[in-house]
Amino acid sequence: MAFRLGNLRDGRAVLMDDGLVAAVDGATARWWDLGRLTDGRLADPMDALGDPAALHALTDAAGIPSGGADGWVGLDGLGPAVPRPRKVFGIGMNYLAHIDEMHRAPSTALVIFTKFPSCLVGPADDVVVVGDRTDYEVELVVVVGRRCRHLDESDVWDAVAGVTVGQDISERALQTASEPAQFSLGKSYDTFGPIGPNVVSIDLLEERDDLLLGCSVDGEVRQDSRTSRMIVGVRQLVAYLSSVCTLEPGDLVFTGTPAGVGDAQGRCLRRGQRIQSHIAGVGHMVNDCI
Ligand code: ZN
């Protein structure tokens, strides 16, 4: 009826309990091997994302499968919750307070770029700081759950497998080096896409359009907002993207970051710092800068 899908480091798809949702140091979660539960059919996370109905059928309203768990895992035992998406969209300038801090004018058209999938890492993996302006951006990430095109806004949530926490790590110097600016490479260095810990089905969220999200650096709160403050919400974003591209299971949409990024304060990431990111009810991540 509801699920938290994870990707163990060895590539196995697993269902998980809520042990890694709250930001608790050293927390663990129980996991159930999806390969075992489906005779191998959904052993791979990408196959599992293509059949959310099967995941809903295996679990109760709290997201727990029947039968005993196969093991326990902490954040550092997980790879990216979606390991091999075909497409990763990023949305720029989608919170007014972030537009203000970046001294931009609101755009009449959506700002959309790609993060190449090779940048994705797990929820406790290191982020490689590549220059003076490597920056953090906590974001709600939407995970597509079925092949679709020309979605109506009213059908979008039904086409979504779930959501996860993401960091849209960005090298500001490269992101803005050209005129006109092309964001994609500056947001695609290896390790620039921590996501996880789980893909959480929408029915586990109390209010899917109003989630608390935030991040801290070395324990100091830098971003603290709600997804209801997005200028263009999930329904409109995904419907628009589907009017251009066929969306496929596992495709990701980074939905934009709220105010508080480092570049706006002259306080970008430094080696040795720790980024902690969270979305209430979805999960948390801890990524060290190296
Ligand atoms: Zn972003």
Image (spheres, rainbow, N blue to C red):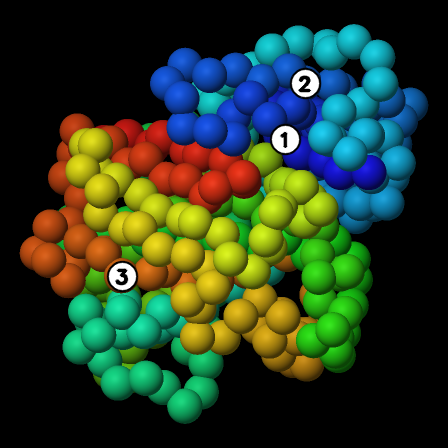
Q: Secondary structure at mark 3?
A: loop
**Residue 221, located in which quarter of the rendered image?**
top left
Question: Can residue 105 be seen from the camera position used here?
Answer: yes
In the picture, measured across the screen, residue 73 lies left or right of residue 182, that is: right
Q: Name the amino acid type tagged 3.
A: Ala
Residue 289 percent across, percent down from the top left: 24, 34
In the picture, measured across the screen, residue 116 lies left or right of residue 286, that is: right
In the picture, measured across the screen, residue 152 lies left or right of residue 115, that is: right
Q: Secondary structure at mark 1?
A: strand
Q: What residue would you read off at disc 1?
A: 6
Label of residue 31 in the image: 2
Q: Name the amino acid type tagged 2.
A: Trp
Q: Is residue 145 above or below residue 39?
A: below
Residue 290 percent across, percent down from the top left: 23, 31
Residue at point 22%, 47% (across, down) = 222
The answer to whether the residue labelled 2 contacts the one labelled 1, judged by CB atoms less than 8 Å apart, is yes
How many C-alpha atoms fall within 10 Å of the one at disc 2: few (<14), some, or many (≥20)? many
The answer to whether the residue labelled 3 contacts the one labelled 1, judged by CB atoms less than 8 Å apart, is no
Q: Secondary structure at mark 2?
A: strand
Residue at point 68%, 49% (across, down) = 202
In the picture, measured across the screen, residue 83 lies left or right of residue 213, that is: right
The answer to whether the residue labelled 2 contacts the one labelled 3, judged by CB atoms less than 8 Å apart, is no
Counting residues from the N terminus, which is met first, the one under dot 2 or under dot 1?
1
Question: Can residue 187 be seen from the camera position used here?
Answer: no
**Residue 239, located in which quarter of the rendered image?**
bottom right
Q: Name the amino acid type tagged 1.
A: Gly
Distance CA(mark 3)–CA(mark 1): 29 Å
Question: Along the line of sight, which residue is nearer the eye, 91 or 121?
Answer: 91
Q: What residue would you read off at disc 3?
A: 259
